[in-house]
Image (cartoon, helix red, strand yellow):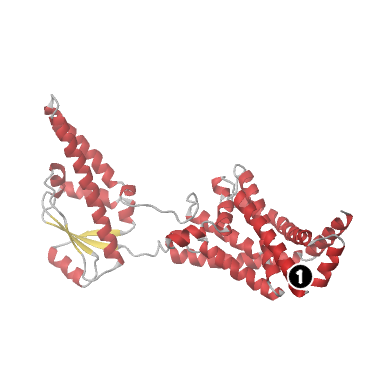
Amino acid sequence: MGRFFTYITLEWKRAFLLLPQFFLGGVIAVIFVSVLTFSVSKILHPIEDRPKATIALVMQESSPLFQTVMAYVKEIESVSSFCSFEQMEKEEALRLLDSRRISAVFLVPERQVESILDGTNLPIHVLLPSGSSLTSALILDLTNAGGLVLRSAQAGVYSLSDIYKEQPIPENVDSLSWILNLENLQFFASREELFCEETVSATGDLTVRQYYLSSSLAFCLLLLGIPCAPFLKTDNLAFQRKLAIYGLKNYIQIFVKASSVFLLLLIFSPVLFLLLFYFKILTLSTLPAFSMSFFFILLFISFYTVLLFEFAPTKTAGIYFIFLFSLFLHFLSGGFLPSPFFPSVIENVGSLLPSSFMIKGIGSFATAVPTTLPLFCYSLICYLLSVCIRIFKKEDSQ
């Protein structure tokens, strides 16, 4: 036991000597990942710079009721963020559509709104430019979705009207149908009934900013094993055998190496916690869950770093392995490109990777739900693989 404490003390001293280099590496990793994540988020979410689609309204009559409905529709978030409406004459609208200066033409018949309420359902003809485009596809999906919701609403009104007519007091049918019409119009006009929303994160509980912040921190932590290279790849086989003679077997040597990395990460952690508190990202209510998740994240990073350096033939190769393998893991986990963009098979596999659980664990600053068991299991797997690799290397060298 005395030899074990002497060995672990010497290894920790070697780790402490690397503190300046470790902090410098951490700063470089933060800058690199911040630039990368900011660039990816701007590419994926250029919402502010997206031009709106112009849709021409050609009306056969100036209906005050239709104008009222359109004024309401224009204020719906899904409509106002995607398109704008302009009232035009038919000839001008068709000319602009042919020149692709507008995205669509809506030919509105007389008494269109009244026809929805009385069941005659006069259609609005939608004219799209020739050829295919993303804007045309979105407009087509939007109009089809609205039409289907209206169709469902009217089916409900007519079904209930038939039931009312079979009752002893049919004189109330008109007033009840009018109430149902208004209720279904409100249902139709709500944005969430026309669109299926998908979150950009695997957790489903984080906003876009929270998700990218969690993703950035997770990738930074994965890269923080790189500054540990000087003391993780310095022991040759002869020294390792000498340690084994003194009772410090392979599993002890791997554990001590991982504990040195864990110690460096732990010293680095208060800086991160203070920054999160300063920017009001982390609060006292979510601190316990975040701290618990963060402990197991650091545990995984420690054994993950040791595993890759054990597998690498040289120190330089270990650095490359950490960078490339971390990049690969983080990409598949949806750290750069949100997982809904991937095929379902890749999305399902990525959700089981350690980087995905790291993002969830860091995201506990918002969700207050800790992630511990998966990270502990991955830490144990990395530890066992590291021991097996070291044993295999020793047997292969004999």
Q: Position of residue 249 (x, y in %)?
A: 80, 61
Residue furthest to the right: 2
From the image, tell me which residue sits under label 1.
394
Q: Quadrant of residue 356?
A: bottom right
Q: Position of residue 272 (x, y in %)?
A: 65, 55
As drawn, 28 above or below 275:
below
Q: Is residue 289 visible?
A: yes
Q: Position of residue 172 (x, y in %)?
A: 14, 28
Q: In the shown orientation, is residue 240 left or right of residue 126?
A: right
Q: Is residue 338 visible?
A: no
- Packing grade of label 1 (10 A; few <14, some 14-19, many >=20) is few
Callout 1 secondary element: helix
Q: Position of residue 192 (x, y in %)?
A: 34, 48
Residue at point 25%, 60% (across, down): 140
Q: In the shown orientation, is residue 47 left or right of residue 273?
A: left
Q: In the shown orientation, is residue 361 left or right of residue 181?
A: right
Question: Residue 97 or 207: which is nearer the viewer?
Answer: 207
Residue furthest to the top: 168
Question: Residue 212 or 325: which is nearer the viewer?
Answer: 325
Residue at point 32%, 49% (across, down): 191
- Identify residue type, mark 1: Lys
Q: What is the tally of numbered marks visible in this picture? A: 1
Q: In the shown orientation, is residue 269 left or right of residue 340?
A: right
Q: Where does the C terminus fall, quadrant-wise? A: bottom right
